[in-house]
Amino acid sequence: MTSARFDKNTKKCISIAEKPGTFGVEFHNKGYALLGLNYIYFPLKVSYGELEPVIGLVRRNFHGCSVSMPHKARAAGMVDALDDSAKKTGAVNTILNQNGKLKGYNTDFYGAKTALQKTLSVKNKKVLMLGAGGAARAIGHAVKELGGKLAIANRTKNNGEMLAKALKASLIGWKDIAKEQGYLLVNATSIGMDSKSETAVSKKTVSNFYAVMDVVIPETQLIHEALRQKKIIIPGCKMAVYQAAEQFRIYAGKELPESFIRQALDSFKQQNSTRLK
Ligand SMILES: NC(=O)c1ccc[n+]([C@@H]2O[C@H](COP(=O)([O-])OP(=O)(O)OC[C@H]3O[C@@H](n4cnc5c(N)ncnc54)[C@H](OP(=O)(O)O)[C@@H]3O)[C@@H](O)[C@H]2O)c1
């Protein structure tokens, strides 16, 4: 991590989560150093019951606040205004403090859309997405905006039905995934997050698709298998890096160079692929 200096004019941004990670801290502080901005970004562990007082603290003391699991949906109800991305997804992962008024954004949506656009085109192509939680909402909206033909399968049928209705997507039974084929398979569940041996689908199902996207950030068995089968892949870290770049733009009002983003992606891939070796 870069060493940080600050004074009374420093703009302070925090990242709140039940289990804060280190990626955002490194990404934002390195970006501020590169562009010579008097900003600082640091993590704060916030439990479920602490969210409301912490949002009050943000209103009084902080320029920006990144919101991670499990606070994204509740944070949407605690800000003063929502950007389109947050309205669409019903979740906030980025808060900008505009003179005491808090505006919420969902840069997961932007990260998903950019990661898709930079890798392939889903226009008029069949996309099967597994999952119906917060990440699935962001990816589902991105797929629809890019013209993909979306089908959703989710373990809990009710949750899948609600998202499919909201996105005008078709619904596939969780037990029928193996029969499916198409252009892009997306794992938008948390399967593979806690255990590297856990995988959402069989090798045969992977072979039924041209490309595979996984939302889980550490490299998963699914991505490993897709690589083995020489599929086009979009790993979770690609979406994470582009969402962070958009978050940086919102806080700093400046774009990071693509070379910085590519470098962050390369080092992220290296750090996160080691668990499968
Ligand atoms: N790459 C990125 O930039 C990025 C951004 C955001 C989130 N994420 C990652 O995305 C993952 C999901 O996050 P989230 O916020 O969407 O969580 P969430 O809102 O809790 O949703 C979890 C989803 O996973 C499904 N699920 C969980 N365990 C399952 C299992 N064992 N079998 C089948 N389905 C299962 C749930 O199905 P039910 O409806 O049946 O419970 C639900 O659809 C996490 O790993 C998170 O770290 C990555």
Image (cartoon, helix red, strand yellow):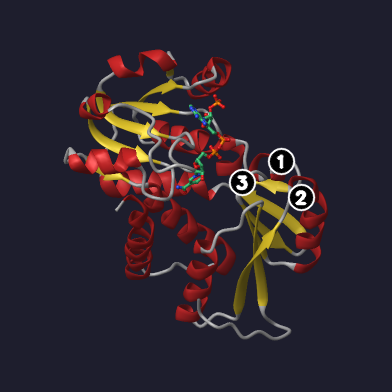
> In the image, what residue occupies the spot 75% across and 65% down?
99
Residue sitting nearer the eye, 41 or 267: 267
**C-beta proximity under 8 Å, tags 2 and 1:** yes
Query: Which residue corresponds to mark 1?
Result: 74
Residue sitting nearer the eye, 235 or 87: 235
Q: Earlier in the sequence, mark 2 or mark 1?
A: 2
Query: Which residue corresponds to mark 2?
Result: 51
Query: Which residue corresponds to mark 3?
Result: 69
> Up-down: is 238 above or below 200?
below
> Up-down: is 68 above or below 200?
below
Query: In the rendered structure, which amino acid carries the disc numbered 2?
Result: Leu
Q: Residues within 10 Å of mark 1 (few under 14, many from 20)?
A: some
Question: How far is the residue under mark 2 from the one under mark 1?
Answer: 8 Å
In the rendered structure, find residue 189 and report the number of the disc placed on it.
Answer: none
* SS for callout 2: helix
Question: How far is the residue under mark 2 from the one under mark 3?
Answer: 11 Å
Q: Is mark 3 within 8 Å of ligand 1?
A: yes
